[in-house]
Image (spheres, rainbow, N blue to C red):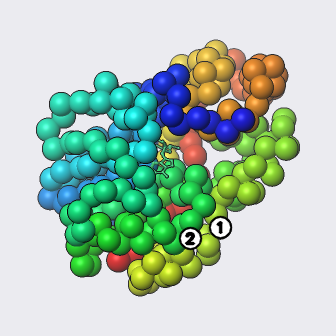
Amino acid sequence: MPIDFHDQVNRLTYAQRQAGDGWAKGIRATVSPEGRHVIDVGCGGGVYCAAWLDLGAASVVGVDFSAAILSGARETLGGRPGLTFHQGDALETGLPDGCADIVFQRALVHHIDDLAACFAEARRLLVPGGSLVVQDRTFEDATHPGSPAHLRGYFFERFPALLDIERKRRPSTAEVELAMHAAGFGEVRIRPLLETRREYADKQEVRQDLMRRTGRSILHELTDAQLAELADYVDDRLPAGERIREADHWSLWVTE
Ligand SMILES: C[S@@+](CC[C@H](N)C(=O)[O-])C[C@H]1O[C@@H](n2cnc3c(N)ncnc32)[C@H](O)[C@@H]1O
């Protein structure tokens, strides 16, 4: 079953981690965050709302359609100066026209059916000349081979049926670009981004993380029994007694 973003059980699933190594560098290479007003659509636990403020943004509004997820974000980050949260849909946020210099959407677009409508709403929110920054994984990004540095690849080795789910939900680079043009944006710059997801003290910590499905909607497609099988499969492939640094492959689309 797909993840239910509205279930209180999942309220902290996208909270309580830091933006990974590589993220700030990738963002700075595409836009200037200092003093900007940023809207983070599909903000989840607000990890990247905080990261934009750390980069020098003047203000960040985190938008998400899930009251449950926003309650988790407020629990973790509530009270941080410059940061507010707003419940709204990516296709109709309810925020005023032209209120942002940068609209950011991380790991959102693979959950959206009508990309052009999602980007048209982003365009409405932007001041003239403002930037839309989309970070997501294409099918190719998500399915790099499994290794201690890319644990996600093991999921598809052990359960190839998950590949069909990814193929259906992951838009291609060209689909995102075309939808941006359809929404009225101009030239689109596309670049790869390698972002550390998490460092684990050892493989026991990896097992605990997998069994909680934290921040990994694809694992909600497995039953509990399948998840336990996957944890064993991954465990067999990881070195004992070593730290494990997991990184994810992403694509960045930036347009004005
Ligand atoms: C995979 S999480 C990413 C969270 C966060 N951006 C991050 O990268 O850590 C996707 C988030 O998008 C939200 N979401 C999904 N569809 C949405 C929609 N139509 N409108 C607003 N938020 C949506 C979900 O509630 C969830 O918090």
- Please tell me which residue is depicted at 50% across the width and 81% down the height of the picture: 182
Residue located beneath label 2 in the image: 176
Is the residue 62 above or below the residue 171 in the image? above
- Nearest the camera: 152 or 48? 48
The three-letter code of the residue at mark 1 reads: Ser
Is the CB of the residue bearing disc 2 within 8 angstroms of ligand 1? no
The three-letter code of the residue at mark 2 reads: Val
- Please tell me which residue is depicted at 14% across the width and 38% down the height of the picture: 81
Q: Position of residue 153 (x, y in %)?
A: 73, 43
- Please tell me which residue is depicted at 47% across the width and 34% down the height of the picture: 14
Residue 202 sits in quarter: top right
Residue located beneath label 1 in the image: 172
Asked if the residue at tag 1 contacts the one at tag 2, i.e. Cβ–Cβ closer than 8 Å, the answer is: yes
Residue density around tag 1, few if under 14, some if 14–19, many if 20 or more, within 10 Å:
some
Horizontally, residue 59 falls left or right of residue 184, namely left
Residue 18 sits in quarter: top left
Q: Position of residue 189 (x, y in %)?
A: 46, 75
Is the residue 55 above or below the residue 127 in the image? above
- Nearest the camera: 133 or 120? 120
Mark 2, secondary structure of its residue: helix
- Please tell me which residue is depicted at 36% across the width and 29% down the height of the picture: 71
Is the residue 107 above or below the residue 98 in the image? above
Is the residue 8 above or below the residue 1 in the image? above
